[in-house]
Amino acid sequence: MVNLETPLKNLPHVTPKYAKTLEKLGLLTVRDLLLYFPFRYDDFRNTSPVSDDLIGKTITVEGKITKTKLNRIFKKRMTVVEATLEDANGTELKAVWFNQPFILESLAQGATVRLSGKLTRDGKKFVMSSPAWERAAREETNTGRLVPVYSETAGITSRWIRWQIKPLLPLAQNLPDILLGELREKYNLYDIYTAIVQVHFPDSREKLVRAQKRFAFQEMFLVQLKSLQVKKQWEENNSLAINFDEKLIKNFVDNLPFKLTDAQRKASFEILKDLEKPKPMNRLLEGDVGAGKTVVAAVASLQTISAGHQVAIMAPTEVLARQHYFSFSKLFEKYGINISLLTNSYRELNNFQFSIFPAMPDLAKRDNFQSIFNDKILNDKKNNRKYLLDNLAEGKINLIIGTHAIIQKDVKFKNLALVIIDEQHRFGVAQRAALQSETMSISDGDRKTIPHLLTMTATPIPRSLAIAFFGSLDLSILDEMPKNRKPIITKIVPPGERKIIYEFIRSEVGKGRQVFVILPLVEESLAETMADVKAATVEFERLSKEIFPELKLGLMHGRLKSKEKEDAMEKFKNKEYHILVSTSVVEVGIDVPNATVMIIENAERFGLSQLHQFRGRVGRGEFQSYCFLFSQSDSKRLSAMEKTTDGFEISKIDLGLRGPGQFFGTVQSGLPDITMENMTNVKLIKFAREEAANILAIDPQLKKHPPLADALKKFSEHIHLE
Ligand code: ADP
Ligand code: MG
């Protein structure tokens, strides 16, 4: 007897070869196959005899085969099957298939069949090229209906999958339904069996949508259950309660060279309120590039440090860590705070660098101290890491800024009370877990406290989506830009107008400004390849020699040693380069207020959100800034960049264009497409969250809901939410 747990390899038509291929798709059992959903559907419902009005349309034709022919084209090593079919009106239709000679075994002369495909014409003849087909006597599976299309892998076709799944559908009645009857009723959702049947072989569009909605709800329900549980677990920890010292913060804010935006005030307040609780904060600060997250992080840090505790700030790259180090040094220069930088690059012999300075009333003295310090300590390579770690463990360092290096085992704190993670999406769950580890937590008799956690992201996503994805976090959003910003002027530049832009660059450089040139990855890949480095080098050479021989150019790419990267960045910052040519994977997250022009080559290769991130590298100072998108193809998509500089707006457009699956590519949540497509459904997210909260309120461990508990456990194993 076949049941849900029957291995697919035991099914009659599944040869060992097929079984292996199915395994590659992650399909081992009948249950897996039933839950393997189509990613799209061919609409073959229009069944009609052929006629002139239907040319160009996709239709299903039923008729009798009158003739068949097999042609072999030896030169091209190709076979062409040709079949002539006579429809109900006696009109002839010619169907051709390439390289599928076996079709002739089924499509014999005299057979009555259904063909589905696009009707075209060749001279006087009606033609269908590679139509879907099946014998008319068989139930509509591949033709004549909404036909499911599955993601295929070599050796397995959607057609084959359809034949396998169809007879197994009744077994779906044995799948436990993790959505209770009342819940399904409330939201008008199909039961699991109906939903499975309709998602594979929908009777209509409406039923399909309803089935998809059920699965989307179900997934979102699990997501929310998971994140609420994580949230609850997190809140079971203790943290140091840090009192809000209004005078201190007011003084700090009043002495900033600018006025905080309302959004910055509100976010700071929310964070300070969190810090007051003896429960750990877990808050996401979301704000577009340049929205001013750093100063909000500084407010939280200052409060924590002045209460006598330590703060750690973690950035994804050395360049960013270093930049934070300087920003915070400047922001806190009057406060006598000891700040250190700890990064760690395996490419370097001297594989870390740091500096430390004590309370000093002014910068001049600090510099002086640093040089003495550098001579004494930094040059003693054996000892400097130890020196830093000792100071950290003794609590003499108040604020440590760095990369992953900060959460290495040998890094010990005295009383760490706040951890801030910049660009949180670049870090994984492991880092979060580290916060609860012994080295980061403080034991005070029986009571153990873990640090408060503030994560920051520059991906401006709408609140509802942020809740869907980061449901275990509280959210503060900087949805307002500092007032002094001049919107960046953005232009798409067709190939013919390159020269004009180069002249423009010359004039900007003439005024003392600087320029970024960004090159996309040659191939679509996550990491930078040698080809990318080469492309950047070639462009660097071309610009240096042919276009701007009179200017100084710098080159940045991921294969440089981190010291070299830093040197390049440093030189750009210090205006030693007029132009910095860089690959896209290199962090250009550096603040260079004097840079006013951003050139992006082959801009069509980037997503809008990514382009927006790049653009955010200019327009940071007082000068009017420009972003030029060089593009070979005149892409409509890119015009959104010309129209708006609002990151939330851009991400909305980007989401609409690419769909949440692509949009969140970097998040790699592992959520199925159906859910991803429904991620923009605000109501669905809201309801799923409400229901998840309801059920956890009465049954926190889901003891009374075993199928749900089971599903959640499986779900947690392959889903990665922050
Ligand atoms: P991001 O949110 O991208 O991290 P930053 O914190 O680096 O942004 O801030 C970008 C720049 O804007 C910095 O130079 C910072 O000093 C400045 N800035 C921050 N807040 C304000 C404000 N309220 N008014 C004017 N400038 C601000
Ligand atoms: Mg930042």
Image (spheres, helix red, strand yellow):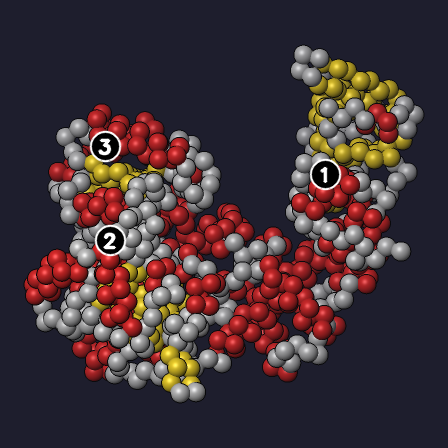
Identity of the residue drawn at 38% across and 72% down: 440
Label 3 sits on residue: 502
Residue 581 left/right relative to 105: left
In terms of secondary structure, where does tag 2 sit? loop
Q: Residue furthest front?
A: 382
In terms of secondary structure, where does tag 1 sit? loop
Q: Where does residue 93 sit, x and y in percent of width and height?
A: 80, 24
Q: Is mark 2 within 8 Å of ligand 1?
A: yes
| Cβ atoms under marks 3 and 2 closer than 8 Å | no
Residue type (three-letter) at the residue carrying disc 2: Asp
Label 2 sits on residue: 591
Q: Where does residue 377 sit, x and y in percent of width and height?
A: 17, 60
Residue count near mark 2 (Cα–Cα under 10 Å), binned few <14, some 14–19, many ≥20:
some
Visible residue check, residue 606: yes
Visible residue check, residue 258: no
Identity of the residue drawn at 10% across and 64% down: 369
Decide: is 643 above or below 456. above
Residue type (three-letter) at the residue carrying disc 3: Tyr
Label 1 sits on residue: 156
Q: Where does residue 150 sit, x and y in percent of width and height?
A: 69, 44
